[in-house]
Amino acid sequence: MNRMDHPKWETDGRDWPNCEFSDFVSAGGLRWHVQRMGQGPVLLLLHGTGAATHSWRDLAPLLADHFTVVAPDLPGHGFTTAPPFERMSLPGMAAAVGDLIEALGVRPELALGHSAGAAILIRLCLDGRIAPRGLISLNGALLPWRGLPGHVFSPAAKVMAKSELMSRIFAWQAGNRRGVARLVANTGSRLEPSGHEFYRRLVRSPGHVRAALSMMANWDLNLIEQALPELQTPLYLVVAEGDQTVSPREARRVCERLPSAELTTLPGLGHLAHEERPADVAAIVQGVAARALI
């Protein structure tokens, strides 16, 4: 991918949330944008598909009062460079994050993943790349889509991801304020204008859009569904009742596969619950830490 297609730190990063804690690190052949802040047990944060570190803008400082927060932009997202298309799979993304963790020399004691970020964390645990004492899945996309969407969406994403023109067209169509507002509304969440603006900076970038589509095209959650019973790390499921991206019912399917998982619901919030009410999510994380880090 042409790096000129991606957000530019010199311009887009000037007022990026928590940019004073940003750094750039080379690991696994990629140049990563990573934010690190706070002191205490290491807490790894992984955002979901199509997002970046901006999604933790209000939550990360709250968590930094109790933890050393480590939050990267996933490969191809935000200000992190993209690997080849075939490495944008679940195993490939997990391996890349594992390389970053090793390069940083940190050992996460807790991990929080939003949406697809939760699946990557589970894969990291199953692969032995991290061994946190608790894993929090926030509106986690952990199981394969059922029915027609599962047969249609991934092939469509693969076609679009392999077409530079399609990525540019999507970025052009979605990168205006009205298009971003529509994308956010479709998650079931309501964000303030500044939240919309950061997403607009991302989706107007064809490179960022192409990375998100590449993830969707390569994603195989059958790998997680089959391996869930093998997960030894305590799993805490946090589900927003108004999530229109990942159905709250999916968490109950996870509990059927892994009865030890604990489920907490957040009323009145959507898929981007951590951006809507960060204090509520921070309280849940602290509650998990009080039990898991004894």
Image: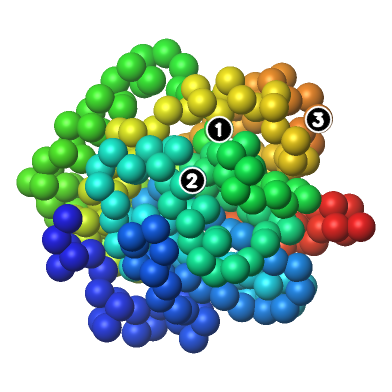
**Tag in front: 2 or 3:** 2
Give the amino acid at mark 3. Answer: Ser
* Quadrant including the C terminus: bottom right
Front in this rendered view, residue 143 or 199: 143
Graded by Cα atoms within 10 Å as few (under 14), some (14 to 19) or many (20 or more), the crowding at tag 3 reads: some
| Residue 122 shows in this picture | no
Which residue type does callout 2 highlight?
Answer: Ala
SS class, disc 2 = helix
Label 3 sits on residue: 260
Q: Secondary structure at mark 1?
A: loop
Q: Amino acid at mark 1?
A: Leu
Residue in view at x 21 percent, y 56 percent: 207
Which element is circle 3 on? Answer: loop
Q: Against 106, is 87 above or below?
A: above
Q: CA distance from mark 2 to mark 1?
A: 14 Å
Left or right relative to 181: residue 274: right
Tell me the residue that label 1 is attached to.
142
Of the numbered discs in the image, which one, if any, rests on residue 94?
A: 2
